[in-house]
Image: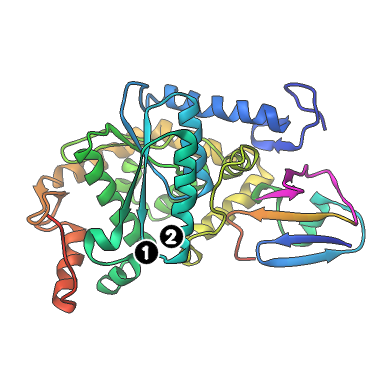
């Protein structure tokens, strides 16, 4: 199999792009793809101060390396959720990459920050682990980004992540969620801009990039992710992709073209976010935001709970 | 005998075969795997040789 770009030996077959490619050409191809997405969707500019959510996995670690190569001003933030040895191993790998890239890394220890690690916090809510984790991370990252004057929070969500969420929202006809699903959520009162430069990148591509670039990423998956329903949807998409290469990419691109239809439902939701949490000031549609509600519940059930202002 | 590691499983095969065919036998599709031989990416049409040690990384298919 010959590389369609340089004529060398191709080991990578990207059926969705109808492209056979060698490792070296793949790296250039992939970086260009990410840069094209950033420019085409107007995600951010080089003069912006950016904050990347780093989990230690192939996606965020690879993205940090690419954005650094492309000369974007991007620092990293890692939230230690308190998974013991796994968290320590992750932190070590992220610190290694931050040093290689010569970038600032902000490390937040959840237990130090709110008095509980993720497992302890989960006792005070019925939310599933992934939902609670997302809530906590979004809250803390937004808080840090506002405090440290970052213009955008970048996440490493890839096409497989996003299409599985999109399908879940379609299956439930969650119009407001569909209006919210976008690679670019502009800043609004109390919220920093959120962007996803990997929106058109297959998970296979992000994994290949991390391996070929020898990025020190963590291969282990989250201990809670085995219970995630999104995995079933991802498997369904793998089967669809196998019979119709490119179907995932088309599904996302066509959705983004039709997304305007769902925006009014999102705007209705935003209008409801007029209140500020009585405890922390975070935008909410209730008197108390979701995280403070859980923390308040913890105070009633556990006197150890503490909260920084 | 070739040694193939898929997540926590280890499979031994005594016949040379094409990677794509092996994946089919273990119910995996190329779209959800990356195969490494000596830490190098392996093409789907490459042959698994008897002395090979191969690591197959899967994503979105770990339940199998």
Q: Residue at x 78, y 45 (%)?
A: B44
Task: Inspect this view and state whether residue A246 appears.
Answer: yes
Start and end of the magenta stretch?
Answer: B33-50
- Drawn side of residue B55 relative to residue A309, left or right: right
Which residue was labeled with disc 1? A82
Image quadrant in which the C terminus of chain A is located: bottom left
**Colouring of the image:** rainbow
Q: Position of residue A277 (x, y in %)?
A: 11, 53
Q: Position of residue A170 (x, y in %)?
A: 42, 50
- Drawn side of residue A35 relative to residue A124, left or right: right
Q: In this picture, is A59 found above or below A293?
A: above
Which residue was labeled with disc 2? A87
Task: Inspect this view and state whether residue A199 appears.
Answer: no
The reply to whether discs 2 and 1 touch (Cβ–Cβ < 8 Å) is: yes
- SS for tag 2? helix
Residue A223 belongs to magenta span: no
| Foreground of the two, A238 or A255 | A238
């Amino acid at each position: 199999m010959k590389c369609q770009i340089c004529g060398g030996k191709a080991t990578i077959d990207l059926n969705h792009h109808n492209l056979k490619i060698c490792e070296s050409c793949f790296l250039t191809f992939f970086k260009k793809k990410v840069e094209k997405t950033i420019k085409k969707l107007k995600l951010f500019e080089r003069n912006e101060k950016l904050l990347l959510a780093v989990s230690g996995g192939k996606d965020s670690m690879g993205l940090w390396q690419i954005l650094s190569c492309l000369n974007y001003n991007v620092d990293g933030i890692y939230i230690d959720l308190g998974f013991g040895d796994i968290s320590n191993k992750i932190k070590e790998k992220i610190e290694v990459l931050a040093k290689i890239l010569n970038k600032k890394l902000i490390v937040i220890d959840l237990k130090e920050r709110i008095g509980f690690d993720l497992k302890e916090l989960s006792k005070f809510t019925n939310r599933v682990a992934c939902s609670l984790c997302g809530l906590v991370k979004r809250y803390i990252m937004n808080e840090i980004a506002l405090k440290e004057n970052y213009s955008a929070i970048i996440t490493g969500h890839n096409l497989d992540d996003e299409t599985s969420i999109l399908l879940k929202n379609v299956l439930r006809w969650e119009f407001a969620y569909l209006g919210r699903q976008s690679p670019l959520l502009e800043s609004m009162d109390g919220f920093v801009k959120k962007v996803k430069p990997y929106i058109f990148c297959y998970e296979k591509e992000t994994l290949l990039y991390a391996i070929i670039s020898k990025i020190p990423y963590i291969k282990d998956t989250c201990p809670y992710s085995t219970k995630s329903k999104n995995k079933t949807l991802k498997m369904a998409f793998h089967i669809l992709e196998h019979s119709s290469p490119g179907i995932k990419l088309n599904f996302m691109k066509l959705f983004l073209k039709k997304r305007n239809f769902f925006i009014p439902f999102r705007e209705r939701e935003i209008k409801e976010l007029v209140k500020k949490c009585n405890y922390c000031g975070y935008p909410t549609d209730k008197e108390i935001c979701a995280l403070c509600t859980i923390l308040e519940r913890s105070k009633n059930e556990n006197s150890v709970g503490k909260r920084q202002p | 005998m070739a040694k193939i590691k898929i997540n926590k499983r280890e499979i031994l095969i005594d016949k040379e075969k094409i990677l794509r065919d092996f994946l089919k036998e273990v119910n995996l599709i190329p779209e959800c795997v990356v195969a490494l031989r000596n830490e190098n990416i392996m093409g789907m049409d490459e042959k698994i040789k008897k002395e090979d040690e191969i690591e197959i990384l899967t994503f979105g298919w770990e339940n199998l």
